[in-house]
Amino acid sequence: MPIFDWTRTDLFHPVGDGSTALFYEKACIQQDYKEMANYILENLHGLTFPGWEPERMAKLDELFEAYAPVTKEKLWDNLKYFLEAIMPTCEETGIKMAIHMDDPPWDIFGLPRLLVDKASIERFLKMVDHPNNCLCLCSGSLGANPENDVADIVRSCCDRIAFAHIRNVKNFPNGDFSEASHRDCDGDTGIVEIMKAYHDCGFTGYIRPDHGRHLWGEQCRPGYGLYDRALGIMYLLGCWDMLDRTEGKV
Ligand SMILES: [Mn+2]
């Protein structure tokens, strides 16, 4: 993700169940990237955030200038150059690279974003077709675009998923989205179908619940509360156990 990591406009949006969660209001992401960056930095309450380092954010104009000539195709070329250069070392040392999806999965502030849907994921995997060139498949990032069928994407490339981020998103008709609990019916991402896809494919890689709501007054990094991520893990394990049981595996 060039310059910005995941991008949200409200870090503490009421979900409706007494908790709050990360929220993206499409209309707020227009021209003023500094306004959004300042809002996020001011709400970290002294905590650090990977991708939101204050010293890097202080150079936003410089960064945007550096990216000005970088078209989407140029960014693809740069990514290919980088991955091809490191693959021999990855193979030698047994390291799998796992690229995270762009979040949200569309261009923001004129910056090109590459890993946004099934077609771009297929392009990425073919571009450097090496078993150590893998995905960090984030259901929440892809799920922000309701056109993405995440379970179908999992089935199509499961052997190249090194790290599964599994979380739920609620989509609104105007393009806004809110993060949601992991429970299938609380969002639109299709958590049960996604778990079934991983289970059917015999996935043995890493899974994490990724993000969580802010519950019970917990003071935490926005989006990374321990309580809800713990609930999320147990929900995902519950799905997995039930799939094992219904398929006669235990
Ligand atoms: Mn993620």
Image (cartoon, rainbow, N blue to C red):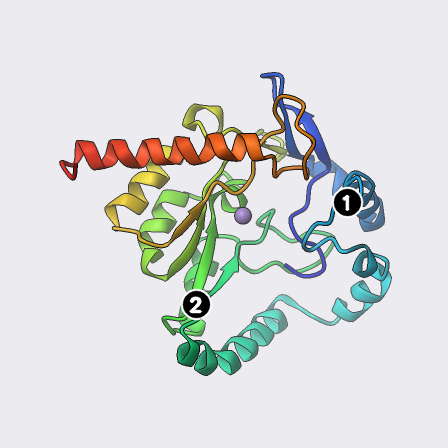
Which residue is at 34% across, 40% downward? Answer: 195
89 with respect to 192 (left or right): right
184 with respect to 3 (left or right): left
Which element carries disc 2, helix, strand or loop? loop
Which element carries disc 1, helix, strand or loop? loop
Nearer mark to the viewer, of 1 and 2: 2
Residue 151's spot in the image, x, y percent? Answer: 36, 43
Q: Is 154 drawn above or below residue 111 in the view shown?
A: above
Q: Residues within 10 Å of mark 1 (few under 14, many from 20)?
A: few
Q: Can you see residue 27?
A: yes
Which residue is at 45% across, 42% downward? Answer: 166
Residue 112's spot in the image, x, y percent? Answer: 65, 60
Distance Cα–Cα, label 1 vs label 2: 36 Å
Which residue is at 45% across, 59% downward? Answer: 135
Q: Identify the image quadrant of the N terminus.
A: bottom right
Q: Residues within 10 Å of mark 2 (few under 14, many from 20)?
A: some
Foreground of the two, 70 or 164:
164
Q: Is 214 drawn above or below residue 83 in the view shown?
A: above
The quadrant in which residue 156 appears is: bottom left
Q: Earlier in the sequence, mark 1 or mark 2?
A: 1
What residue did someone put label 1 on? 30
The quadrant in which residue 71 appears is: bottom right
Residue type, mark 2 in image: Lys
Tell me, for residue 224, which label it has, or none: none
Residue 60's spot in the image, x, y percent? Answer: 83, 59
Q: Is mark 2 within 8 Å of ligand 1?
A: no
Which residue is at 38% across, 35% downward? Answer: 236
The quadrant in which residue 221 appears is: top right
2 with respect to 238 (left or right): right
What residue did someone put label 2 on? 96
Residue type, mark 1 in image: Gln
